[in-house]
Each structure stands twice: as structure tokens, then as C-alpha cells.
Image (cartoon, rainbow, N blue to C red):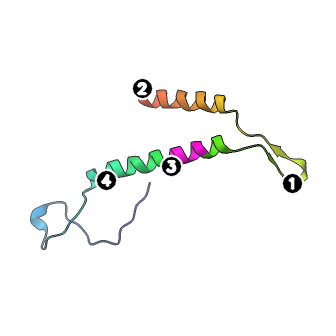
């Protein structure tokens, strides 16, 4: 992920602050980034599971994904991620 800010430069030591400024230090952002990752993952999985078979140009057909297979694959990768 990449994040940009147009805020003032924030010194990491409070002694260096010239005026009072409300800031959220880097380590406090981790839960926000984790939530964004999880929400993105959920949206991708939802879109995969909601997709139906589609007919395209020149008679091309794209089948919907078999949901039982998707469930097994996701569970396998989540288990591997938790293991380490």
C-alpha cells in the first residue's frame, strides 16, 4: 500500500514540536491498513462468488466459479497464512 499526506511534517519526538498538533503516529496506523487489506480481500472474494456464467462476443462463454472449490482454496490459503 502507498499513502500520501498533504499535512505538515510531523517530528517523531514531542520535544521538537513548536505548536500543539494532533497526530496519529505510524504504529497507530497499522490497524487502519489491516482493515483496508481485509475489506479489499472480502470485496474480491464476494465478487468472485457472485459472478454468474457470462456469454461474450463470438460465442465465448465464461463460466461462474464453482463455489465449493473457491471455499476450499480460500480456506487453504488462510490456514497457511495463520500457520506462518
Residue hosting label 2: 83
Q: Secondary structure at mark 3?
A: helix
Of marks 2 and 4, which one's residue comes earlier in the chain? 4
Residue at (53, 29) in percent of width and height = 75
Residue hosting label 4: 29
Task: Decide: few, some or many residues near mark 4? Use Cα within 10 Å; few <14, some 14-19, many ≥20.
Answer: few
Q: Secondary structure at mark 4?
A: helix
Residue hosting label 1: 57
Q: Which quadrant is home to the C terminus?
A: top left
Answer left or right for 30 relative to 37.
left
Q: Which residues are magenta?
A: 40-46
Q: CA distance from mark 1 to mark 3?
A: 30 Å
The answer to whether mark 2 and mark 1 are in CB contact below 8 A is no
Q: Nearer the viewer, mark 3 or mark 2?
A: 3
Residue hosting label 3: 40
Of marks 4 and 3, which one's residue comes earlier in the chain? 4
Can residue 84 be spotted in the picture? no
Can residue 76 be spotted in the picture? yes
Q: Which quadrant is home to the N terminus?
A: bottom left
Amino acid at each position: 500500500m502507498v499513502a500520501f499526506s498533504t499535512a505538515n511534517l510531523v517530528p517523531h519526538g514531542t520535544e521538537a514540536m513548536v505548536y500543539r498538533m494532533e497526530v496519529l503516529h505510524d504504529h497507530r496506523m497499522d490497524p487502519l491498513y489491516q482493515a483496508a487489506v481485509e475489506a479489499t480481500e472480502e470485496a474480491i472474494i464476494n465478487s468472485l462468488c457472485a459472478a454468474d456464467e457470462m456469454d461474450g462476443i463470438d460465442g465465448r462463454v465464461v463460466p461462474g466459479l464453482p463455489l465449493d472449490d473457491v471455499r476450499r482454496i480460500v480456506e487453504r490459503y488462510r490456514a497457511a497464512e495463520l500457520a506462518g
